[in-house]
Amino acid sequence: MMVGAGAGHAGVVAVLLSRGASPLKWDGGGRCAVHHAAAQGRPDILRALLEAAHSQAGGHGQLDNLSENGFGFGIKPDGWRRTPLHLAAEEGHVAVIEALLARCVDGTVGRCRLTR
């Protein structure tokens, strides 16, 4: 999943998600596929991953319990304390930043909780 997301292979990610693969498995650097999609500037893949995470969480809408500090859009910071938002901003991926913010309850970066 992480390799597909990081390489921009939306079809690979879609197949893996359809087979029940978790978008929230962590690699050795503390990143999940959402981090990789954000770093590579792939809002399409990011949206699919977030939707799958929402569905796999039972459709409860809020994934905040997966975040250490409420700033990770439901995703833990990586080993360097960077969230997907940090990675997208670092690379200038505006569409990814917009996709992340669109998933927030209130549209702000403070204590964001993911919503459908």
Image (tube, grey):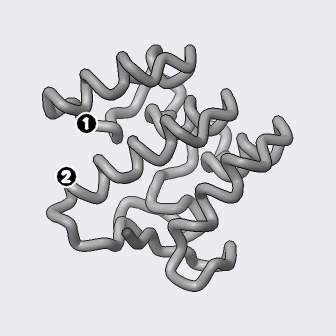
The answer to which quarter of the image holds residue 60 is bottom left
SS of the residue at dot 1?
loop
For residue 74, above or below residue 24 = below
Q: Amino acid at mark 2?
A: Gln
Can you tell which mark lies on residue 76? Answer: none
Dot 2 surroundings within 10 Å: few (below 14), some, or many (20 or more)? some
The answer to which quarter of the image holds residue 71 is bottom right
Q: Amino acid at mark 1?
A: Ser
Q: Which residue is mark 1?
A: 22
Give the residue displayed 51% in from the left and 42% down from the top. 46
* Quadrant for the C terminus in the image: bottom left
Give the residue displayed 45% in from the left and 17% down from the top. 4
Q: Nearer the viewer, residue 27 or 99?
A: 99
- Relative placement, left or right, of 37 versus 52 is right
Whether label 1 touches label 2, CB < 8 Å: yes
Upstream in sequence: badge 1 or badge 2? 1
Q: Which residue is mark 2?
A: 56
